[in-house]
Amino acid sequence: MSRGSHPEDVTRRTREVALRAVRRLAVFEWVLLLGAMLVALVGGGVVAALLSTPLGVSFRGMWAVASLLMFVVPGGFALRRARQAERAVRPLTLNDTEEPDV
């Protein structure tokens, strides 16, 4: 008998593959988040180096504010766009999964 011929084996294997994919995507999400934080910190440092002296503010304060803005503002736009897309898709998926009344 060949491996995977039983429905239980197929279901178990499918579940294992799906769980592995979910774990890998979670790790990838964290790597992307850390990368975005690093880019925001470097960008905030560049902005602080350029603007702290002409504005007469401390480098550290300007760096903190600029880094937060570079991380939070694009993240907010991305989150807003994702929620709008989710709201647009939600009615379509609810209609597809509902069973018609008999």
Image (tube, rainbow, N blue to C red):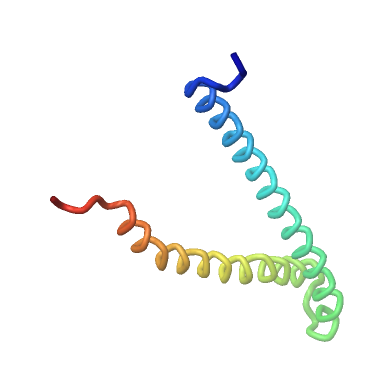
Q: Position of residue 6 (x, y in %)?
A: 50, 20
Q: Residue furthest bottom?
A: 54
- Of 56 and 7, which appears nearest the observer? 7
Measured along the vertical axis of the image, is residue 66 above or below residue 54? above
Q: Position of residue 27 (x, y in %)?
A: 68, 43
Q: Residue furthest front?
A: 1
Which residue: 61% across, 65% down? 75
Side of 96 relative to 13 (left or right): left
Measured along the vertical axis of the image, is residue 78 above or below residue 31? below
Residue 19, picture quadrant: top right
- Of 48 and 9, which appears nearest the observer? 9
Which residue: 61% across, 33% down? 17
Residue 32, picture quadrant: bottom right
Residue 26, picture quadrant: top right
Q: Position of residue 23 (x, y in %)?
A: 63, 38
Q: Residue furthest left?
A: 102
- Of 74 and 62, which appears nearest the observer? 74
Q: Position of residue 77 (x, y in %)?
A: 57, 71
Which residue: 85% across, 81% down? 53
Side of 89 relative to 65 (left or right): left
Which residue: 86% across, 75% down? 49
Quadrant occupied by the N terminus? top right
